[in-house]
Image (cartoon, rainbow, N blue to C red):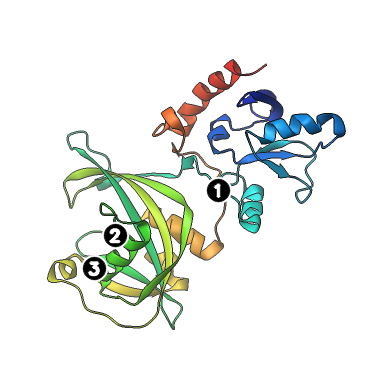
Amino acid sequence: MNGNKVNVKIGKNKVKIELERPELIYGIEGIYYNEFTEEKEAYIEAVEKTVPIIHSQDMKLQENRFFIPAHNQEDFEYAIKKHLSIKQVIAPYFYGVGKEKIRNDKKTQIRHSVIAVIKHNIEDKYLCVDCKGRLCKSFVLGGIEQGEKPEQAALREVKEETGYIDVDIIYHSPFILINHFYAGYKGINRYATLDILFGKLNSDENIGISEVENEKHVVKWIPKDELLNFISVNNNKFALNILLNGEKAYTGEGIMINSDKFNGMNSKEARNIIIQEILKNSI
């Protein structure tokens, strides 16, 4: 089916359009439509009531196609430029290996966490933690407590883990990650959804950290050009790639999110099922 045209039903309307990754239909934010003729004007108006029409003049498209900014780089750049919605339906999936491989004899804790990437106020350095007794070198990383927003959690974790209190969060990535691993230091498996936030230090004001936190890790400011060699946590490397190379659409496989009954399913597994459901609604 990849690369083929299928008649996909959009609400009560139907439109013939190319669909290469059927699981991404849940991430559709609109349709690029470049055939604006008088005879089709009424039809286009009807479709637009269900799914927004993204005018394709800027894109110079030869064909009509879905607008999926979270998973298509061209669409992502256009959405950023035009301040349009970005709906992610496939999250990158990171799983534990070695000592962090999932253990069937341990319970799994569902968690929502943050990665806080904080730049120094003067130097081109970033706030990191180097765990004691285990290989875990990362940006500030921690869970979101009940009632907290990700931005609030990031500031709290920075304060608790590093002591810095004069910090601003300046950007919250539209992309989330899934991290599934065995946390030996807690004795449980963890299935964590991770938000990525970027911020900056305003001043060196620091209240210190508790003895408990001090026993866990060492706080370090790592130069930007040394981060690639320092960061050891794979999901943090995803955040680091954004820092070093800019944010891009995610085109890989992963775990389905924002996808109704397919949430939590591997995107490869979901694809075949979704193809059959699309065909039922096709003409």
Task: Kindly identify the amino acid type of the residue bearing the numbered disc 2.
Answer: Cys
Regarding residue 96, the answer to whether it shows in the image is: no
Task: Kindly identify the amino acid type of the residue bearing the numbered disc 3.
Answer: Glu
Q: Which residue is mark 1?
A: 86
**Residue located 19% across and 37% down the image:** 107
| Residues packed near mark 3 inside 10 Å, few (<14), some (14 to 19) or many (20 plus) | some
Residue 227 at x, y = what percent?
42, 68
Regarding residue 24, the answer to whether it shows in the image is: yes
Which quarter of the rendering shows the C terminus?
top right
**Residue located 56% across and 46% down the image:** 70
| 273 displayed left or right of 47 | left
Q: Looking at the rendering, which quadrant does residue 211 occupy?
A: bottom left
Marks 2 and 3, Cα distance to the nearest angstrom?
A: 17 Å
Task: Kindly identify the amino acid type of the residue bearing the numbered disc 1.
Answer: Ile
Q: Looking at the rendering, which quadrant does residue 10 occupy?
A: top right
Task: Look at the numbered disc 2 and give the secondary structure of its residue.
Answer: loop
Q: Is residue 155 above or below residue 35?
A: below
Q: Which numbered disc, 2 or 3, marks the residue closer to the eye?
A: 3
Residue 120 at x, y = what percent?
41, 78
Marks 1 and 2, Cα distance to the nearest angstrom?
A: 32 Å
Nearest the camera: 152 or 217? 152
Sequence-earlier tag: 1 or 3: 1
Q: Which residue is mark 2?
A: 136
Marks 1 and 3, Cα distance to the nearest angstrom?
A: 32 Å
Q: Are marks 2 and 3 in contact (CB under 8 Å)?
A: no
Residue 59 at x, y = what percent?
75, 49
Q: Which numbered disc, 1 or 2, marks the residue closer to the eye?
A: 1
Sequence-earlier tag: 1 or 2: 1
Nearest the camera: 133 or 27? 27
Sequence-earlier tag: 2 or 3: 2
